[in-house]
Image (cartoon, rainbow, N blue to C red):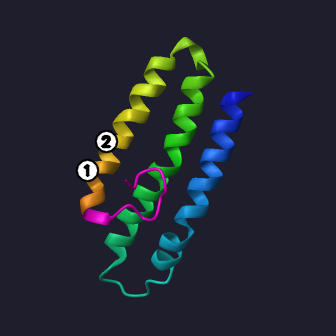
Amino acid sequence: MLAWMVGVIGTITTAISLIPAVAVIASVNGVSSLGFAAVLLVVSAMYLFVPILIALAIANTGRRWWLWLTIALAVIVLLLVARFAVGSLGVYWITF
């Protein structure tokens, strides 16, 4: 039950905080910036994966909680490194 709550609430709140950034990405109509928009969409998807991976670790899926937690931490480190290039996109749990 806790894993479901973490996964659902974390994903929904992360998606809500990503709405302004995704709206800006969707409003791009120039061909030269399509590559940057693709990168921002991939980074947005990575932000959405973190609560799901943490929920999988809490649920102890396949008795591999350590694997899901390690992947989640690796994604968070990648997002922290990418934050200097693309920003935090308004996600509340990565800004400090």
State left or right for residue 22 relative to residue 32. right
- Identify the element where label 1 is drawn: helix
Q: Residues within 10 Å of mark 1 (few under 14, many from 20)?
A: few
Q: Is residue 60 above or below residue 54?
A: above
- Where's residue 96, x and y in %? 37, 53
Disc 2, SS: helix
Front residue (pair 35, 25): 25
Are dots 2 and 1 in contact, CB under 8 Å?
yes
Q: Which mark is residue 81?
A: 1
The amino acid type of the residue labelled 2 equals Val
**Residue tagged by mark 2?**
77
Q: Residue at x 75, y 27 (%)?
A: 1
Question: Does the magenta run of residues contain 69?
Answer: no
Name the residue at the front extreme: 96
Q: Position of residue 59 (x, y in %)?
A: 63, 22
Disc number placed over residue 57 in the picture, else none? none
| Residue at the extreme top of the image, as rendered | 63
Q: Identify the amino acid type marked 1.
A: Val
Left or right, residue 25 beside residue 8: left
Q: Residue at left 42%, top 57%?
A: 42
Residues in magenta, as a range: 85-96
